[in-house]
Image (cartoon, helix red, strand yellow):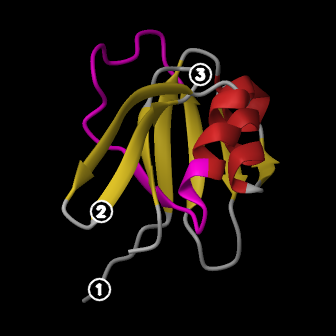
Amino acid sequence: MTISVGMITFDTIDPVPLARWWAKQTDGTIVEENDGWFVTVATGEGKPMLAFQKVDDPTPGKNRLHLDLVSADREAEVARLLDDGATLVARREMPGFEWATLADPDGNQFCVSGPH
């Protein structure tokens, strides 16, 4: 038996603006809004959906699960994300590999690296 990732879900106090932000960043499309309590974003054929569900009290502190995103031009993509409302958490490196840890407008951390 095999499983695959179908959807990655974020808890948030206000799903619609966060879903719109991530749809813009991933060139995705909001496919369902469900009266603002559960919003889904399609990110492309064969790729996992992103979902944003309304919660009264998101888990405080650093998220335990995060997205690792890849770009052919990491620095340009990081600059674009920062210009569009992300915040820089840290630039990191290890021998032969560099990445930036950012946070979305809700504070959810994610990483952007170059091709592996």
Q: Is residue 63 above or below residue 46?
A: above
Q: Main secondary structure of the magenta part?
A: loop
Give the magenta part as a residue range: 54-75
In this view, the mark in front (2 or 3):
2
Residue drawn 67% across and 24% down? Answer: 85
Q: Which residue is mark 1?
A: 2
Q: How many marks?
A: 3
Q: Nearer the viewer, mark 2 or mark 1?
A: 2
Percent position of residue 54, x then y: 56, 23
**Amino acid type indicated by mark 2:** Phe
Q: CA distance from mark 2 to mark 3?
A: 26 Å
Q: Does the CB distance between marks 3 and 1 fall below 8 Å?
A: no
Where disc 2 sits, the SS reads strand
Say which residue appears at 36% left-offset and 44% top-offset: 66
Please tell me whether residue 59 belongs to the stretch shown in magenta: yes
Is label 2 in contact with label 3 (beta carbons under 8 Å)?
no
Q: Earlier in the sequence, mark 2 or mark 3?
A: 2
Residue 45 screen position, x and y as percent: 69, 78
Secondary structure type for disc 1: loop
Q: Which residue is mark 3?
A: 105
Location of the C terminus by quadrant is bottom left
108 and 111: which is toward the camera: 111
Q: Secondary structure at mark 3?
A: loop
Residue 17 belongs to magenta span: no
Amino acid carrying label 1: it is: Thr
Relative to 99, is 6 above or below? below
Disc number for residue 97? 2
Q: CA distance from mark 3 to mark 1?
A: 34 Å
